[in-house]
Structure formats: structure tokens, C-alpha cells
Amino acid sequence: MKFTDGLWQLRPGVTALYAAEAYDVFTEESAFTVTAPTTVIHRRGDTLNRPVLSLRLSSPLENVIRVRIDHHASDERGFDLVGAEDGHGIVKTGDATTLVSGALSATMAPGAPWDLSFHGDGRPLTSSGPKSIGYFRLAEDAQVDPAPVGHTRAPLHLAQQLALGVGEVVYGLGERFGPLVKNGQTVEIWNADGGTSSEQAYKNVPFYLTNRGYGVFVNHPGHVSYEIGSETVQRVQFSVAGEGLEYFVIYGPTPKQILERYTALTGRPARLPAWSYGLWLSTSFTTEYDEQTVTSFIDGMAERDLPLSVFHFDCFWMREFNWCDFRWDPRVFPDPEGMLARLHAKDLRVCVWINPYIGQRSPLFAEAAAQGFLLKRPDGSVWQGDLWQAGMGLVDFTNPDATRWFQSKLRALQDQGVDAFKTDFGERIPLDVAYFDGSTPERMHNLYTHLYNTAVFEVLEERRGRGEAVLFARSATAGGQRLPVHWGGDSGSTYESMAESLRGGLSLAFSGFSFWSHDIGGFEGTPDPGVFKRWVAFGLMSSHSRLHGSTSYRVPWAFDEEAVEVTRLFTKLKLRLMPYLYQAGVQAHESGTPVMRPMAMEFPGDRNAAHLDTQYMLGPDLLVAPVFTPDGTVELYLPDGTWTNYLTGERVRGGGWRTERHGFTSMPIYVREGAVLPIGARDDRPDYDYLDGLTLRVYPGPDGETTLTVTDHATGEPTQITVTRDGGEARASSGWTCELA
């Protein structure tokens, strides 16, 4: 939200008060509080009849500093910070007051002008200078940017601006489908069901990081408005409605270290089952299907030697108008228990679609309404709407009894044989409601989906155990990374939409999410065979891979025979890479480093990588550049070093750009210099014994030792292997087989 009209003026209808000086500072052992009048105090009379802002600085984790700003005292709900432990900082006093937390420090200069600065390892990171903390009042006719769709503009706002240095670029803020670098953009943190081709986002996360070695997390689950080098080109501004604003500065200095600390604060992703990395096939959305259709798809995959791990039933497994009643439509699935048993006999897991809404015709609507389990309007009546399901209500997950009721319906499906849930929707959460626990509707809008997904994930972990639960979730906010997997939502079936999907996934990776998927072939429309085949290759070189569409099926033979060949090639390639990919998932669980990594995350010192959003690293050693053109032309950048084409063995010197042309059975996949890839012995399933028949493929690199870890997916036991290069030869500890690439 923009409050100013250029450098000199405020927008019509806006009044502003700014923190003008650090009038006094009260110190504690590990925190300090600053009194910040909104004018410089020259005489005693200046202390009267004047708003004052109060700042408190503390440290909940090493290398993380919390800044709390209040006008009037407020104690509103923030995110669940599972890793916060106050008392990590040390206050130092002198000419200025400094809070030190690890290698990060925040220094408050005394008096005027206002000057709060942050340093990492003694190096300037960012600062809050004059007119950077503002308290704004908006008249009813104020000429400011409109609020996001579905949200009413509030009259009071607090805003913080932090300095941007020359050449500093900003990443993150959730799954956003525009440019990866956010400089120059206005970003509204407000979950919306807007597809992949708009400025809206399903997964809004009020966290960004920059290439200067720090990140900033705003602890506000409601609407946060960002101006990123836009309203004031030298600063990032974030503003919230109300009387309080809290944010955290997180030091790295590397992007991976920033994410490690951010996810320590907000939660690490769960470890995922190995079977979830295999290929998922869906019924698609509005297509016609019954058990015979499903069986024909599954048998068709097996007949064509296309390994399949999960079959997904989309919305119409339930009867139309009844979503959700959690009952199989008896007209097309008369024997669900028998059908699921038959699918399990084919060695498949089963996923079904759900959402947190209850249509009025569902038998569960009256049951939930009678017990007070649905969101209510302020007058006490049940909130109902017709967008999506006729007369639908929303489950109120702030009511523990409502949550347990919802979970009981899922347990019944698990009893039938369901293994996973696609948790769709959760974005269109109304504001004209009253929550059971008194939560503010504005703050619950983005947070609702987190309560919804948490409720479902708990049921899966309860039944299957930790490391075996998996969702396929569309919406999220900060902390949602704890509940994987997330997919990119409703894309089109074009090269452009494939590229925008990748941008969204890379932006989400910079926002603390480690596992990500997308609809192979696109969701809306039917892709031409070329788009489908290119998307198959991209999809299978992602952490999770699902064939899914809207009005048409996504079985490969529906496109052409080459599509079958491409699906077979890249599915088997991924399955052979499972020892490597599963270990990347373990690393994500332990440290928060994503499986799919933006180039700027893996090569933070390479300026050529800063804006790259058409390629990525899959784990630490594989560079993937999807093909987004009909003729197979790809422009890609290889950082410095010797890179080896994974498919052909060709060695290429990096440090520059390349233009290549690829057929449908190929794409640029390059292996980093010095890598040792653990290659599995099987290509028919993802959940096999990775050590049985393991081959260590050794790529060019300097002489010396390389240590890698292969984790047993069944027991979680890691095996460390050391590979020694010596004069063009390689040998591995404990007799493991080495293969020179």
C-alpha cells in the first residue's frame, strides 16, 4: 500500500506520524525498549498530547532479532513460532545501544535523527532511517491503493521501511508467478484463488530474503502489504492494519543459512515417504470416470511399462452438490472398500480430494450446523455462500470439537484404505464471520488454511506414523512448510504457463517451502502433445510429480506414442535417482534447504544467477533447464566449473550461457563438478533398498575425498560413504561400486 505522493507529499486523505528520535532506551540483559516520539522533543511541553511509538528488540534464536513496534498496546495473534526461545541476545551499551545475537547485531543510535541499523559479522545489512517507521490514518475517501479483493481497507496502519542497497535484490513472499526478483513490485499478502497467471497467490508468506545476507519475516498472519523498491525505490516497505507490527531480521549470510534459521523459527518440513516421490496419476477434475475407467488407466500404465506409485481421485469421487460429505458416489463407486483393496493389490497408494467446505445438500451440513461447527456470521447465523458449492458453509477449525469432528470423517476414509489427501481450496475465507475462539477475521483469512491442513496432516501422522504422512495442498502461509507437499494450483496448458509455474515454485522455495509439485501438462485446457511431453520431463525432474488436468485426461497415450516413451524415460530416470533425491528430502527435513533450489540460492555469489527463473538445481548437484519452446531451443546458464550432461556424458566448461536444442526425449540436465551421485539399482518403484546394488557415479573433480550420505527410507538410518579420487581413479569406502562418469 502506497501512502505517499512522491517524495514530498502524502496522498489525499492520509495523515502520517513517524518515529522521529530514540528519546530514551530501557535495557535488560537480553532485550531493550525504545521510546520513539513522533516529533523531536525539545522541551517538556513537547511530551504532551503527542502519539509515541514503542519499540522492543529481543532475540528468539541466535542470529535472529525480533523488533516489536506498538502505538497503543496490542496483543493480537501471530504465527505459531515453534522454535522461538527468548533470551538469546546480549545488550551492550555505550554511545548507542546494541543487541547482539550470534553474528547479528541491531544498534539504536540515541536521539535524532532516527537510526536503527542491522549488521552481520560487522557488515552493514539494512537500516531503519528517518521517516521509516510510520503510523498512518486514512480518511474514508483517502486516495490509496484499494485493498485486495474480499478485504476492506482499515483506517489505521503501521509501516516499516528498511533500506535497500545498490544491487540488492529481493526474493520470496510466497508462491508468486511473476518475476522471481521482487524489486519494483507491490505484493499483497492475501490468499486468493487466482490461478497461476495473475498477481494473486494461493500461498502468501510474509517473509523475504535478499542477496545481502539477511531475511525479514513479518509476524502478522493477516494482510501485509509490501512495496519493494516501488513507492520508495531505496527501501522495502511492509505495512499492516492496526496498532502493532512485529518483524524478525534473520542473518545468514547465505540463503541456505537464512532459510535454516527461518525454518527453525517457523518449523521444518516433515520427512516424506519414499513412495510419494514416484509418479502420481489423477482422474482429472470434471472428466467422466468410474472404477472401470480407473482400472483401465492403471493397467494401461503397467502394460506400457510406466511405473506408477499413487492414484488420485479428484472431486467427483463424491456426488455432485455434496462436497464434502466424504462418501463415495454409489452410482459409480458402489464398492469403495473392495476397489481400494484391489488398487492396493496393484501396489498403489490412493489419494482422494477434499476441501474444508460443506455444501448445503451434504448430509453433514445439518449435522455440523446443529453442533456449531461451521463459521457463523456476527448475528449468529451460519455463514453460507454459493461460490463453488451451493449453500456451502466452512468448518470452523478454531473450534476444537469441530476439528475433531472433521478429522473423524477422514479416519473413516482411512479405514476404507485411503492413504493421502489432496487438501484443496482454503483461500476464499470471508471476513463477515465470527470465529469460535474470537479470532479476528482479517488475521484468520490467511491462517485458516494452516489450521485446515494441520488437522488433516495430524490424522495422517496418527495413522501412518511420522515420515509416512503426505498431503497435496494448494494453499498455505508461513509455517505451512511443515505440512508437505504443496502444488502450484490451476495453470494453463501452454509453455508460458509451464514457465510461470516454475517461477512460482522457485519463489516458494525462497519462502521456506522444500517440496513442490505442479500439474503435468497444465490444468485448464488440453495441452498439445509437444507441451505435454516437455511438461512431463519438467514434472519428473521436480520433487513430486503428478499427471492431472481439468476437463481432459492426462494418461500419456492420450497424446501420442512418443509421450509414452518420454514418460517412461523420465519416470525411470527419477526412480534411479531416488537415493539422491530422498537424501535431498532428508536434508530439507533437517535444515530447511529445498529440494528444488533457485540458482541464486545455490550460487549466491554469481551475479548471472541472481535473476534466473527458467532453470534450477534439483538437490545440490543436478542443474535442470526445462524446455519452454516448440522447437526445443533452450538458453541456459552454467556457473563456473566443469559440468557433465547427465544424459549424454558430454563435458562442458561453465561460466557462461549456452543455447541448445533438444528433442522430446532430452532436456538439459547437468551434473556439477566434483559430484558423486548415488544411483539406485531399480527403476520400477521409488521405495526400494537404496543400498542394494548402489552405484556411485563419480564426476570430474579435484583429487581428494568426497563424503555423501544415503538414508534408508524404511528405518531412517543414514549410511555415510567416502569416495576418494586419485589420479583419474576413484574408490569408495566399504567396497561400494564406483563408476567414473
Image (cartoon, grey):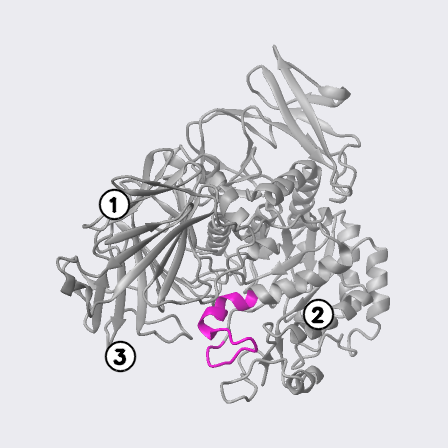
Magenta-drawn segment: 430-449
Neighbours of disc 3 within 10 Å: few (<14), some (14-19), many (20+): few
Q: Is 26 situated left or right of 291 in this image?
A: left
The image position of residue 556, as x and y in percent, is 67, 54
Mark toward the start of the polypeptide (3 vs 1):
1
On whether residue 478 falls in the magenta region, the answer is: no
Asked if residue 380 is positioned above or below residue 414 in the image, the reply reads below
Q: Which mark is residue 407?
A: 2
* Residue at left offset 62%, top offset 54%: 484
* Residue at left offset 46%, top offset 77%: 431
Instruction: Name the residue that disc number 1 marks.
Output: 109
User: Closer to us: mark 3 or mark 1?
Assistant: 1
Q: Which mark is residue 357?
A: none
* Residue at left offset 40%, top offset 32%: 605
On whether residue 448 falls in the magenta region, the answer is: yes
Residue type pointed to by label 3: Glu
- The quarter in which the C terminus is drawn is top right
Secondary structure type for disc 1: loop
